[in-house]
């Protein structure tokens, strides 16, 4: 609705009588009602916009508040990415059901682009195997004799899976074929 429509509604809501009828024809009174109508129209538009912002799948302006609600960004996902990726991360956190099955951990890793396999080498311990090329870093010999020549690991994957694993279990990460 626009300002004129709200001004017309306000005019229709005025009490009846000669005083109000004479005021309705005066230009200052009409301008006052139009100003009130403009405020109501802007308020109406803001309310409609908030209904879009209330849904994390379509939010833009309130995305930081949604992220804070679900604890993003966190130490596992420090880089938020694009607005669409940030929305997807918020929605994923909101609809996550959790679990402790191999399928749950495999799907979680797959959602972040990691291919993993899981096996159970001991009671309350599971091993996550992922290809080495996802995280192999070669070093140079510019440091001291104690510096590693090669390092491996995937901090994001390890953080994601460690955060959601059952508390009584240990998780081992294996990098390679």
Image: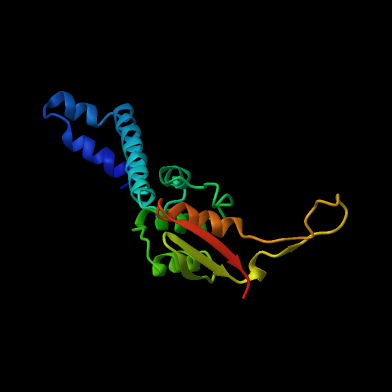
Residue 109 vs residue 78, the one in the foreground: 109
Q: Is residue 134 left or right of residue 6?
A: right
Which residue is located at x 13 percent, y 26 percent? 18
Which residue is located at x 32 percent, y 29 percent? 32
Is residue 57 something that shows in the picture? no
Residue 171 vs residue 53, the one in the foreground: 171
Q: Is residue 112 left or right of residue 27?
A: right
Q: Looking at the picture, how far across and down is residue 129, in whole percent?
A: 55, 69
When asked about the image quadrant of residue 174, the answer is bottom right
Instruction: Name, please, the residue furthest toward the front.
Output: 122
Is residue 156 something that shows in the picture? yes
Which residue is located at x 23 percent, y 35 percent? 10
Instruction: Name, please, the residue furthest toward the top.
Output: 19
Q: Is residue 17 left or right of residue 30?
A: left
Q: Looking at the picture, how far across and down is residue 114, in whole percent?
A: 54, 68
Q: Is residue 26 left or right of residue 137?
A: left
Image quadrant containing the C terminus: bottom right
Residue 50 vs residue 157, the one in the foreground: 157
Does residue 124 sit above or below 18 in this rendering? below
Q: Looking at the picture, how far across and down is residue 77, in whole percent?
A: 54, 52
Which residue is located at x 48 percent, y 66 percent? 111
Does residue 166 sit above or below 122 in this rendering? above
């Amino acid at each position: 609705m626009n300002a004129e429509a709200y001004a017309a509604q306000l005019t229709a809501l005025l009490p009846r009588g000669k005083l109000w009828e004479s005021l309705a024809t005066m230009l200052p009174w009409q301008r006052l009602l139009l100003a009130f109508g403009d405020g109501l129209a802007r308020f109406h538009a803001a309310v409609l916009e908030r209904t879009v912002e209330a849904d994390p799948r379509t939010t833009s302006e309130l995305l930081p508040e949604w992220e804070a609600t679900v604890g993003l960004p966190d130490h596992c996902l420090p880089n938020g990415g694009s607005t669409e990726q940030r929305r997807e991360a918020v929605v994923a956190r909101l609809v996550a059901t959790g679990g402790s099955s191999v399928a749950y951990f495999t799907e979680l890793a797959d959602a972040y682009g990691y291919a993993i396999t899981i096996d159970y080498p001991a009671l309350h311990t599971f091993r996550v195997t992922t290809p080495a090329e996802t995280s192999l870093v070669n070093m140079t010999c510019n440091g001291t004799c104690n510096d590693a020549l090669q390092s491996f690991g995937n901090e994001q994957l390890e953080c994601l899976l460690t955060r959601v694993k059952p508390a009584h279990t240990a998780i081992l990460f294996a990098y390679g074929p």
